[in-house]
Image (cartoon, helix red, strand yellow):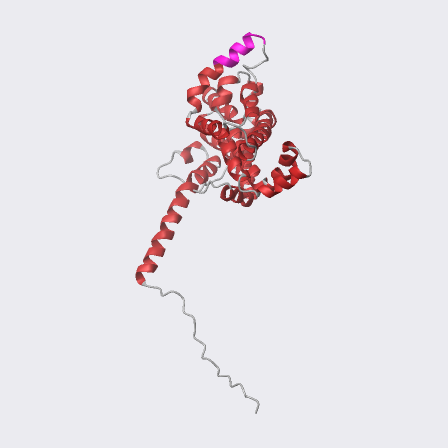
Amino acid sequence: MTPVATTSAAPRVARRGPRVTPAGLAAGFAKYAVLIALAASYAFPLYWMISSALKDDPQVYRIPPVLVPNPAFWNNFLDAWRSDNFTLYTFNSVFRYALPSTVFTMVSSALVAYGFARVRWPGRNALFALCVATMMIPYTVTMVPLFIIFRRLEEAGIGKWIGTYNPMIIPALFGNAFFIFMLRQFFMTLPEELSDAARVDGASELGILLRIILPLSKPALAVVALFQFMGTWGDYLGPLIYINKYTMFPLALGIQKLRQMLSQVGMAPKAYPYLMAVSTLAAAPIIILFFFAQRTFIEGISLTGLKG
């Protein structure tokens, strides 16, 4: 006899999701209410800047505040930009300061971080700890000694420093402690086998860095580039100390010059809207840059261990 297999259809048990309770609904509602309130509080200053750029002074200082400009003065953007040489200031910010500083910082920080992460040498950990410890020293503590150093170098005939962007760009060739730490953390997550295989094939340490490590580190390098570009784009204190010619002003000093100019020539009805209009145009490139690079930026932050 051939055994006959009998199958019995097992009843399907409907899967139920987590039970929703009134307390859970209340907790979820409270969580999202807090998040929406925080998001609104962060976004409101940006909205106020943009809306103020479309007003005149009576609307800006009216009580209760005017949230929606009526009428909206769209020509404030063009008039404010033409009121001074902001095209030159933008050129200075991008090509004389932000881009060179960003490129130099990326190159130098990557080289130093690779030495701390992958090259074994005596005293590596102690020197890395010293490098990280320098992050605790604020710029306001070192700006006066640095200014004295650069001035004395110039007096000794070693380069031109005061009145140029050199004091803000040349130090970028020696790396940034924060970016060195961040890139080192990322490099240490990459498999050692890749470097070992390249060494077997005769690759030098510099070749390994250029051909293997850096191509795999694009998210981390993007974070470095974005942070450094943002820091130099909006830098006010550094150019204020070293730049003394109007033709070399970056945008931050140009906006301050516009404020002084408007207060002197009696253009009070347009002073605040013009300042907000130029500030909006100055902030727009950073906002657009982050919007298009946010996926790479967030990926780099998560992979380098800098989670909030």
**Quadrant of the drawing holding the C terminus:** top left
Q: What residue appears at the point 46 percent right and 19 percent down from the top-left corner?
A: 264
Q: Which residues are magenta?
A: 148-157
Depicted 126 relative to depicted 25: above or below: above
**Quadrant of the drawing holding the N terminus:** bottom right
Q: Residue furthest right?
A: 201
Q: What residue appears at the point 49 percent right and 33 percent down from the top-left corner?
A: 181
Total marks in image: 0
* Front residue (pair 164, 213): 213
- The answer to if 135 sits in the magenta stretch is no
Taking the image as drawn, is residue 302 in sight?
yes
- The answer to if 154 sits in the magenta stretch is yes
* Front residue (pair 205, 139): 205
* Front residue (pair 40, 117): 117
**Residue 124 at x, y percent in the picture:** 51, 29
Taking the image as drawn, is residue 84 in sight?
no
Q: What residue appears at the point 58 percent right and 8 percent down from the top-left corner?
A: 157
Depicted 169 relative to depicted 280: above or below: above
Q: Residue furthest bottom?
A: 1
Depicted 45 relative to depicted 22: above or below: above
Main SS of residues in magenta: helix
Q: Residue furthest front?
A: 1
Q: Residue furthest left?
A: 23
**Residue 220 at x, y percent in the picture:** 55, 39
**Residue 145 at x, y percent in the picture:** 45, 15
* Front residue (pair 150, 285): 150
Q: What residue appears at the point 65 percent right and 37 percent down from the top-left corner?
A: 199
Q: Is residue 205 left or right of residue 273?
A: right
**Residue 10 at x, y percent in the picture:** 46, 80
